[in-house]
Amino acid sequence: MQVTQTTLTNANPDYFTTDGYAFKLPGGVYLVRGRITMKQNIITDHNAIVLTGLPFAWKYTADIPGASVNTGTSLIMQGVQGERSVRLGVKHEAWAAGIAVSFAVIFPPQFIQ
């Protein structure tokens, strides 16, 4: 079994620091793992670009299936058609400076350009 790992970069270092990796798995599946530490408060929205440099582009504008986080916060992650980035949003609340969020997202082959 071959697994390829790609290091991803932070697109918005003024507001948060990010460590992220994309793993290409057999069958064309990608697993993206990341950790976000907020430097400033962020309000509920979907407009924070978390990671760039994904080794693939989104095929659809849609919520990413399979997103999960290690907090009680409801996380929304979106891919925008043709972009190599992941967008972050929260539901029902804001995130305070200093909070750290880890996430893992599975990208099925049909969602990849």
Image (cartoon, rainbow, N blue to C red):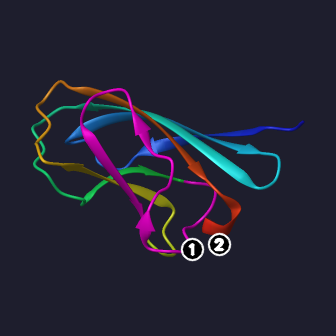
Residue at 50% over, 55% down: 65
Label 2 element class: loop
Q: Alpha-carbon neighbours of circle 1 within 10 Å: few (<14), some, or many (≥20)?
A: some
Q: Amino acid at mark 2?
A: Gln
Which residue is nearer to you in this view: 15 or 48? 48
Q: Position of residue 90 (x, y in %)?
A: 22, 48
The extreme right residue here reads 1
Lower position in the chain sequence, tag 2 or tag 1: 1
Labelled disc at residue 113 = 2
Which residue is nearer to you in this view: 31 or 93? 93
Q: Is residue 56 magenta?
A: yes
Write down the region rendered in magenta. Answer: 54-79
Q: Amino acid at mark 1?
A: Lys
Residue at 26% over, 30% down: 72
Q: Quadrant of the N terminus?
A: top right
Residue at 20% over, 42% down: 14
In the figure, 29 relative to 110: above or below? above
Q: Is 89 positioned to the left or the right of 6 in the image?
A: left
Q: Quadrant of the C terminus?
A: bottom right
Q: Position of residue 44 (x, y in %)?
A: 13, 51
- Overall secondary structure of the magenta section: loop
Q: CA distance from mark 2 to mark 1?
A: 5 Å
Q: Position of residue 96 (x, y in %)?
A: 11, 32
Q: Is 31 positioned to the left or the right of 76 in the image?
A: right
The residue at which mark 1 appears reads as 59
Residue at 82% over, 53% down: 27
Q: Position of residue 35 (x, y in %)?
A: 40, 30
Q: Is 49 positioned to the left or the right of 47 in the image?
A: right
Q: Alpha-carbon neighbours of circle 2 within 10 Å: few (<14), some, or many (≥20)?
A: few
CB-based contact (under 8 Å), mark 2 and mark 1: yes
Q: Is residue 36 magenta?
A: no
